[in-house]
Image (tube, rainbow, N blue to C red):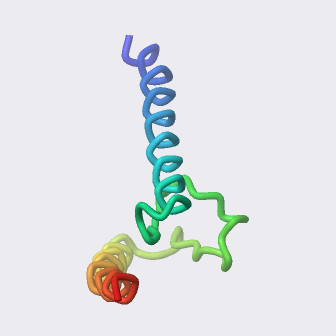
Amino acid sequence: MPGRLSRPFATVHRKAQDSARARLHEWAASGRIAGFALAYPEMKDDRLPAPPTNFAAMARSDFETITIRGEQLMRTVLPMYQRAVDL
């Protein structure tokens, strides 16, 4: 039963995500929001302006350290850009 339910769940989840992304683009186009930054694991690498780094060979502890640092940076940088947009 769990195997049979995973595909429909994935489909519904994907549709919900697509709807949310579409809404963000609509809001930005209409001026309701100034802009947005959205990163998610399913992003297509060939659509990015720079190729992503492959972390497969990295030790798990090093990967976790870098991940935590990335999260810290995003929490610091995003509010800076938000203020710049609001000015």
Residue at (52, 52) in percent of width and height? 26
The location of residue 82, given as percent across then percent down, is 34, 81
Closer to the camera in the image, 29 or 8: 29
Place of residue 34 in the rendered image (x, y in percent of width and height, measured from the top left): 44, 71
Q: Is residue 79 left or right of residue 16?
A: left
Q: Nearer the viewer, residue 28 or 44?
A: 28
The structure residue drawn at horizontal position 49% and vertical position 40%, both measured from the top left corner, is 19
**Image position, residue 20 (x, y; %):** 44, 45
Q: Quadrant of residue 37?
A: bottom left
* Quarter that holds the C terminus: bottom left
| Residue at the (52%, 42%) spot, across then down | 18
Is 2 left or right of 26, judged from the image as shown?
left
Q: Residue 48 in the image: x percent, y percent?
A: 65, 70
> Quick check: 26 above or below 67?
above
Q: Is residue 44 above or below residue 52?
A: above
Q: Residue extending furthest top?
A: 1
Residue at the image position 46 percent from the left and 70 percent from the top? 35
Q: Is residue 19 above or below residue 34?
A: above
* Side of 74 relative to 52 (left or right): left
